[in-house]
Image (tube, grey):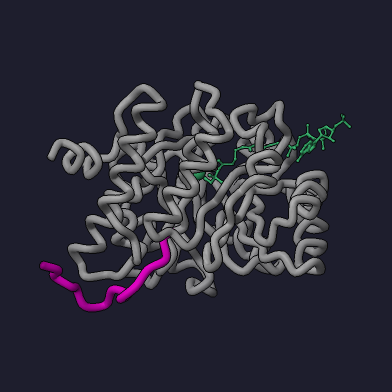
Amino acid sequence: MPYPVEGLPHQVTIYEVGPRDGLQNESAVIPVEVKAEFIDRLADAGHKVIEATSLVHPKWVPQLADADRLLAGLHRRPGVRYPVLVPNPRGLDRALDLGVDEIAIFASATETFAAKNLNRSLESQFEMFEPVVARALDNGIRVRAYVSMCFGDPWEGPTPIAQVVTVGERLLGLGCYELSLGDTIGVGTPGHVTALIGAFRTPERLAVHFHDTYGQALSNTLAALRSGITTIDASTGGIGGCPYAESATGNLATEDLVWMLRGLGIETGLDLGKLVSTSTWLAELLGRPSPSRVVQALSKG
Ligand code: HMG
Ligand code: MG
């Protein structure tokens, strides 16, 4: 029985990042067939947007080195979007060859993480992204942007809100349709979320991307919903992290999010039972239980 709360949206889009953010951080090598089945099961559960993989340097993220094979063999369903991460012109060349129709660029809000994750300075990351976005748009490709370390950075401490807004608005200005605010290391708290979203001129173009390192991802999501956000990134089973930020643990679990939204009477179009069975199937293959509390609770029964 749902208990709706006034002022929250009636419907949200869950932007599923499990196959990309989830699997990029696994130490085991996962066969490409398993990745393809994971994506298929997510579509079966009702996902309409599934971030499939990354076209980055294979030496930088060996876990996703099979991206070209995965995308070439992907069983694309009508009505489902399969965006991929693309950092630079070489990544875009690969995306165009593979017929990808939606990409996501990923920037840093801090100098140190720009160096560690992209081998660029805060300023020179834009020199890398600008031609990518321009050429992608010319080719009819939709472009999303991420900005990482929006709340804090393991090397620099808390990230000033004005710095995040400057980077984020520059990315939107390139022509990206949406900006996802990444709490890469999960240090944000709800008041901080409200303040950050409120500092943007176009909150309707924002999405949120919470990692659950400090157990704040759901409370932060509720704060974001109250600020008008209707696109939430999540990872089925709560797997995830960033290989270039050790303190990053799993993303907000899609199941935990769906449980909360269902209780609030907010529509997601997702089948919770199918998500949980996907996560238990994947957990068995990965050799460890899902960190999602909802998966743990529902898979017992
Ligand atoms: P670089 O070493 O500066 O690259 O890396 P470069 O431009 O100097 O090129 C060096 C060589 O790499 C060249 O080959 C290029 O062709 C090749 P060579 O001529 O020497 O033989 N190369 C590539 N090959 C294949 N695909 C490519 C590619 N690019 C160059 N795309 C680069 C720069 C950006 C490529 C590198 O730093 C990189 O791949 N970084 C990716 C790191 C990453 O994927 N991190 C995880 C995702 S971000 C994240 O998880 C956060 C997020 O979830 C949000 C949040 O939580 O906050 C999104
Ligand atoms: Mg992430």
Look at the image and tell me whether residue 216 can be seen: yes
Q: Is residue 30 above or below residue 136?
A: above
Residue 87: percent from left, percent from top? 71, 46
Residue at the image point whose x is 58% and y is 34% from the top: 32
Compared with 82, 249 (above or below) is above
* Residue 170 spot, x, y in % from top left: 67, 63
**Quadrant in which residue 176 is drawn:** bottom right
Q: Is residue 296 left or right of residue 199?
A: left
- The quarter in which the C terminus is drawn is top left
Where is residue 260? Give x, y as percent.
23, 58
Residue drawn where x is 42% and y is 48% of the image: 41
Give the magenta range: 1-14
Q: How many marks?
A: 0
Residue 7 found in image quarter: bottom left
Horizontal relation, residue 202 to residue 86: left or right: left
Pick the front one: 4 or 7: 4
Q: Is residue 219 visible?
A: no
**114 is higher (above) or lower (below) than 29:** below
**Quarter of image, res 113:** top right
Asked if residue 135 lies left or right of residue 292, the reply is right
Main secondary structure of the magenta stretch: loop
Instruction: Compare residues 148 and 207 and report the one nearer the observer.
Output: 207
Counting from the top left corner in percent of width and height, residue 90 is at 82, 44
Q: Nearer the viewer, residue 139 or 284?
A: 284
Q: Confirm whether the magenta stretch covers residue 8.
A: yes
Quadrant in the picture for the N terminus = bottom left
Task: Name the residue rendered at 78%, 46% in the picture.
Answer: 94
Q: Residue at x 59, y 48 (%)?
A: 109
**Is residue 64 part of the magenta span, yes or no?**
no
